[in-house]
Amino acid sequence: MENADQNPSPETVRRARAFWEQSRQDLKEARRKLNSKSYLDSSYLSLQAAINSMMSVCYLNGEFRVPNFSTIQLAGRLEGFDARFRAIAPHCRALEEVQGRSPYDPARDEADERSQSRLNYAHGDAILKAVRGYLKENRKRFFSP
C-alpha cells in the first residue's frame, strides 16, 4: 500500500486516470440515457460515474482495497484525503438508493423515474465536480483532469 504522503507510482496514476476517464464517460452516457428517456439506466450510470470518480481518488492515495459497490462507504474513505469530500455525503446517500430500483418492478412509475433520474444525474455531477476540484488542486502530484 502506497503512503498518501508520497507520490503514487506511474502505474497507480495510470489506473486512477482510467477510473477518472471512465467516470466522465459514464456521466456523459447518463445524460444521453436521460435525454432518450431511459431513466433507470441513466440513474445506474450516474451511480457508476460517482463510484469510478471516487475510486480514482482512493487509488491516488494508496487505497486499493475499497468498497467499490457503495458510494457512502467510498465517501467515508475520501473524507480523510480532503475536507471537500464531507460535502458529498448527501449526494452519495441519494445515489445509493438507485440500487434498490429494479427494471422488473411491475409498479414502476415513469414520472417518478424521470424525476429521480434527473436528481441522480445532478448528484453524480456534484460528486464528479468535487473530485475534479481535488484533482485540479493536486494536478502536479497526480494528473490534470
Image (cartoon, rainbow, N blue to C red):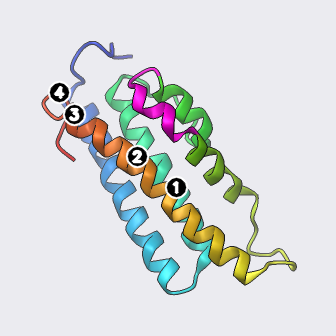
Which residue is at a point 44% across and 52% down the rendered structure image?
Answer: 126
Disc 4 or disc 1, which is closer to the eye?
Answer: 1
Are the residues tagged 2 and 1 within 8 Å (C-beta)? no
Q: Is residue 83 magenta?
A: yes
Q: How far is disc 4 from disc 1 in space, using C-alphas?
A: 27 Å
Are the residues tagged 1 and 3 within 8 Å (C-beta)? no
Return the residue at label 2.
53
Which residue is at a point 59% across and 70% down the rendered structure image?
Answer: 117
Q: How far is disc 2 from disc 1 in space, using C-alphas?
A: 13 Å
The three-letter amino acid code for the residue at tag 4 is Arg
Which residue is at a point 33% across and 48% down the rendered structure image?
Answer: 20
Return the residue at label 4.
141
Name the disc covering residue 123, or none: 1
The three-letter amino acid code for the residue at tag 1 is His
Q: How far is disc 4 from disc 3 in space, using C-alphas?
A: 9 Å
N-term mark: 2 or 1: 2
